[in-house]
Amino acid sequence: MTALTTLDRLEAESIHILREVAATCRNPVLLYSIGKDSSVLLHLLLKAFAPGKPPIPLLHVDTTWKFREMIEFRDRATREAGVELIVHVNPDGVREGVGPFTHGAAEHTRIMKTEALKQALDQYGFDAAIGGARRDEERSRAKERVFSFRDSAHRWEPRRQRPELWNIYNARMQPGDSVRVFPISNWTELDVWRYIEREGIEVVPLYFAAPRPVVERDGALLMRDDDRMALAPGEVVREDRVRFRTLGCWPLTGAIRSQAASVSEIIAEMRASRASERQGRVIDFAPNASMEDKKREGYF
Amino acid sequence: MDATTPRELLRLLTCGSVDDGKSTLLGRLLYDADLLHDDDRARLGDPSDFSCLLDGLAIEREQGITIDVAYRYVATARRDFILADCPGHAEYTRNMATGASTADVALVLVDARKGVLTQTRRHSWICALFGIRRVLLVVNKMDLVEYDCARFATIEAEYRALAAAVGIAEVAAVPVSAAVGDNVVHRSARTPWHTGPTVLDWLEAVPVGTEHLDRPLRLPVQRVHRDGQDFRGYDGTLAAGRLRPGDAVTVLPSGQRSRVESLYVAGESAEEARQGQAVTVTLADHIDVARGDVLAAVEAPPDCADQFSAHLLWLAEAPLLPGRLYALQLGTAGAVARITAIRHKVDVDTQEPLPATRLAMNEVARIHLSLDRPIAWESYADNRTLGGFILVDRQSGQTVACGTLDYALRRAANLHWQDLSIDRAARAASLQQRPRCLWFTGLSGSGKSTIANLVEQQLHASGRHTILLDGDNVRHGLNRDLGFTAEDRVENIRRVAEVAKLMNDAGLIVLVSFISPFRSERRMARELLGEESFVEIFVDAPLEVCEARDPKGLYAKARAGRLANFTGIDSPYEAPLSPELHLRNHGQPPEKLAQEVVKYLEQEDPDAP
């Protein structure tokens, strides 16, 4: 008999991790960010606990700047899956009118994403937060454990990571500590798309090429999703055939010109292209491996 | 590459130090196989400096070294790969073990000018210890030895001898220059004498882990799966063999049998499951199954045991103390474990056995391990899941060690508990009292012994049967062989707790007056004596007060440097977090504090005479 395929092995590993969380953590939650990785994660969550219901709710930290299509998709996908969804918005940020255009990308992300996440975890007392990060996304993530511990201030300390051997995950915590768990750590972007294709998983239509209103700014193609984006002199909104490789806050997420309108066309396009995935993310372009710094502050 | 072709996944470990050009080799592999992203390519300033692609943490880039395991994901036309890139220095043995624990195969790099070195030996031995049986020897920097065929043959022969000695079954060798690009992806014209594979050839051809497929079923239970009133299943990942509905299974350690009624693979109803798959099963009979149990083939179940000989790699900064209790995780099973003996430690560079009483970080030893309950197990060589374990510090929750089971020790099985017809309750009844253990802990000079003495006098006066075990006195007799190192302190407490338990069994109220500075040992005593008996009494006096009192002149000696390992001075005291009684001893007469203890006992046990 031949070996299990790559996707079979990755799927089994992820399900094993999700079940370990359910068996060993007191109050876990799954951070659902609506993107393709979250769609895969939700699919794995349903599989891990079928034929029963997942004993783990979903949490979406809404920055109020997500694409409208994402929010529609979120509400429909979670309703159809029959899972519990908690939505949290940082009320302080809303009161102060924080947004990427007024406060800058870094400040917006810190307040509406990083701080908001900490608020939600503290408010609900979650001790384990499952996320869809993958080690192939970025250099400091390549070294992060599957069970990644945070102190009571939600900080990551890369030098003090627990050794992680075999498929044994030690979830013991001190009071106040919490753990981030990354079940699809070992998946690549291509694995994710192949799995979406194999399992017929639905994703936000923004991943597929379509004519969309875009503005070119600082080398990135931004889709003007609502009228909160003021145009600078000389800027024009043009219709272009684009899609997104990752989804986040729309003013911080660059589109790419593409003809790929289906999952199989995306896979074909990825094989031909050699640009790495996060290049569309404005937030990663701060100096030198800034992801590591952000994570040490508690960014997911 | 066709999207519908099933793809295989190979997990591999790369060993070798920075100087051997390991990062350069990986970079070259990605570059020549045309697998680099454009932005990575752009970051590549000097085309031979591929290592800048791989060292991920800021601290590592600053210091130009690799500290932690980095995972790289590579997909070639034939296969998918997960590369665990591990640091090479001895002080990162623990990180190498992390990478080796999940790897199918390893690449071992050697510099052609230097040949097989101490570190080659160390890396190969750790690979073998953690179950890697197939290795590709990459002899790098062949350009710097003029592609000398004889040099390569010498190194290969030397390495084959080493591999055989440490237990690596299959070795292939390849002459390489990662900097130039010889035999990494492209076969080199400069080594016409090499008939073996290139690095990429080997990676795409070596068999991936299917070793346990034809072995008897092993399914460690991860969790009991309940859904509503009707559904009760068991989740787990198959550690060996196959499983079909209708199969007869034995549940271990209980030994109960049943039949698989229904099977789900990754949540979907299925007719067969195999090693590596995540499944849910339901059983035909209502029997008791819990997380940590193993479902096994009826015709060939694994053994159950609670005493083992094992190899242990110590991962924590604080040293291993034999005798201390740790939490063990093996597969999904948990137990309380004690290292009963360090047989010897092993020099990781030479594999020479060395005598040892403690283990420091990155040291490996052969040990004896004793558990508080039997678990289903197999030797690590047979099954990584049922033979690989970690030890966790019960206070901090940190993972402090990992280990591999070699064989079971039969001592506990042969040494049966003598069933006694007169039991503890009978003896207690004839003494008309509830046996208790009053455990006084606190700094030297805090007043423990004075208070314990007063308490015993009062209990005695009211007709109770008591005994007082005092630290100093016991050290003159039973424990005269023990000193004051951390190891000896652990053993000191273990013996006293065992004696206290015997005396409790005899029906006595036992007063123990010991500094007992460590939380874990007091917890051990509590677990041994039982919650119904154990009363932890914290005699709490500030260090300055104790030092000022200094009834035995010991603080003065310790301060003068003439007494080592003195609690409070150069050895820590871990104060109790939730003692039954907390006596604050400054300015109060000891009689008043003793009265508090007696009052506590009366409230606990109002019917006592």
Image (tube, coloured by chain):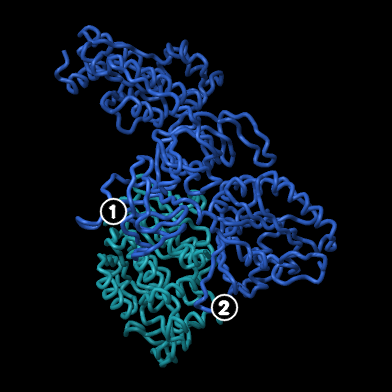
Please state which of residues A19 and B490 is positioned toward the viewer in this rendering. Answer: A19
Distance, label 2 to label 1, CA atoms, is 47 Å
Q: Secondary structure at mark 1?
A: loop
- The image quarter in which residue B462 lies: top left
Screen quadrant of the C terminus of chain B:
top left
**In contact (CB < 8 Å): disc 2 and disc 1:** no
Q: Secondary structure at mark 2?
A: loop
Numbered tag placed on residue B1 in the rendering: 2
Screen quadrant of the N terminus of chain B:
bottom right
x and y, in percent, of residue B295 in the image: 38, 48
In front of the other: label 2 or label 1?
2
Q: Residue at x 56, y 39 (%)?
A: B311
Q: Residues within 10 Å of mark 2 (few under 14, many from 20)?
A: few
- Which chain has been coloured blue in this picture? B
Q: Residues within 10 Å of mark 1 (few under 14, many from 20)?
A: some
Please state which of residues B234 and B38 is positioned toward the viewer in this rendering. Answer: B234
Chain A hue?
Answer: cyan
x and y, in percent, of residue B206 in the image: 63, 62
Q: Is residue A147 left or right of residue A273?
A: left
Numbered tag placed on residue A125 in the rendering: 1
